[in-house]
Every structure is written in C-alpha cells, then in structure tokens.
C-alpha cells in the first residue's frame, strides 16, 4: 500500500505541475506567427470623451416627449424624462404615472434605461393615455442608444428613433 505524500509536499508538486503545463502550452504556438496591427481606437476614444462632455447638459435638462415612433403624443398628456446629473438615476412621467429607475451609459452614445418603477394610478383622460403610457414604458426598456443637441434628444433602438424629446428646462 502506498502512503500519501506529506501535506507540505503537495503545494510544491501542484506548482511544479502547473509550471510544466504552462511551458508545454507556450511551445505549441508557432514562433513565426504574423503579428497583426491593433485597430486604431482613437476615433472611438474621441467620441467617448465628447459624450462625457455633453452628458452634463443632457442630464441637467428636463425633456418633454415630442414624438413616439414618429407620431405626436396624445394631446393633453405630458410625458417627460430627466436624467439626474452625477448619478445613474432617471425620473419622469409616462403620461399618467411617474417613474424612477436607473440607467447606464455605454460607449459613445449607448444607453440602457431600467428597470423602472412606476406608480399605479388609472387615468381616463385624455383618451388613450394609458395605452400611450404602456408603449412609452416598453420603449424606454428597449432603448439602447441616444443622440442629442441642445434642441432635442432622440432615444433609439438600434438605428430607429423611437422617442423624441424637446427641452423644457435648460441646464444651468
């Protein structure tokens, strides 16, 4: 019967085994492998820096819905959104109920909104406001990009503008 190695020898044996495996793996790559150039990331980095400069005025503005999938919002309804500066928090009104939640900006113009919490009141007027609210909330959860000037904010799903906003209050 074989006796096990003392406990103090096991870590050294494991390290030696890992060293041999690492040596074998490094030998398996061809020495004459062509080195590929790295892609130029400076245009992306410039766009990210510009987005960082733009975000404070976007986040410092209250935006009112001007269009939903190319259509005007229901007359008499007020849908608005406000991204909180220096936070990853968003608040707004979907027409009847108010919402709050988080958002994450990604890359130069990417954004992910949600999950969002929504109050639960029922509004009869204006007609259709509850259906519009459901659509707005669904679209906010699907948005993955934005573009903005000081006169408008477009929230997009891929290349399609789904929600268009105009400023109500400008950033200080």
Image (cartoon, helix red, strand yellow):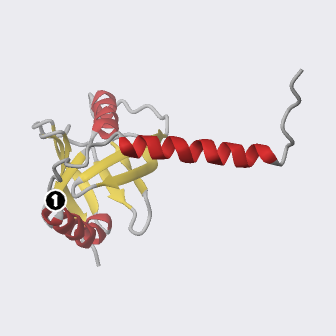
| Residue 39 image point, x, y percent | 15, 56
Q: In the picture provided, is 151 more to the left or to the right than 23? A: left
Count of labels in the image: 1
How packed mark 1 is, by other alpha carbons closer than 10 Å (few <14, some 14-19, many 20 or more), is some
- Residue 14 position (above or below residue 35): above
Camera-side residue: 165 or 122? 165
Q: In the picture provided, is 78 more to the left or to the right than 73? A: right
- Residue 149 position (above or below residue 72): below
Give the position of the C terminus as an image quadrant.
bottom left
Give the position of the N terminus as an image quadrant.
top right
The reply to whether residue 115 is in sight is no
**Helix, strand or loop under label 1:** strand
Q: Write the residue at 44% across / 64% down.
A: 87
- Residue 107 position (above or below residue 68): below
Q: Residue furthest front?
A: 1
The reply to whether residue 151 is in sight is yes
Camera-side residue: 91 or 121? 91
- Residue 101 position (above or below residue 61): above
Q: Write the residue at 51% across / 40% down.
A: 21
| Residue 27 image point, x, y percent | 37, 44
Q: Write the residue at 37% across / 47% down.
A: 93
Q: Residue furthest top?
A: 1
| Residue 140 image point, x, y percent | 31, 40
Report the residue marked by disc 1: 148
């Amino acid at each position: 019967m074989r006796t096990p190695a003392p406990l103090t020898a096991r870590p050294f044996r494991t390290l030696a085994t890992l060293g041999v495996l690492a040596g074998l793996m490094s030998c398996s790559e061809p020495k004459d492998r062509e080195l590929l150039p790295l892609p130029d990331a400076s245009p992306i980095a410039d766009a990210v820096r510009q987005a960082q400069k733009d975000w404070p005025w976007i986040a410092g503005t209250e935006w009112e819905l001007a269009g939903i999938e190319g259509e005007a919002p229901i007359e008499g309804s007020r849908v608005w959104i406000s991204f909180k500066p220096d936070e990853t928090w968003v608040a707004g009104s979907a027409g009847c109920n108010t919402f709050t939640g988080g958002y994450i900006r990604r890359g130069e113009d990417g954004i992910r909104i949600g999950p969002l919490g929504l109050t639960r009141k029922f509004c009869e007027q204006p007609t259709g406001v509850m259906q519009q609210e459901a659509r707005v909330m669904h679209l906010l959860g699907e948005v993955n990009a934005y573009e903005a000037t000081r006169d408008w904010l477009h929230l997009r799903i891929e290349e399609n503008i789904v929600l268009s906003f105009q400023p109500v209050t400008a950033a200080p």
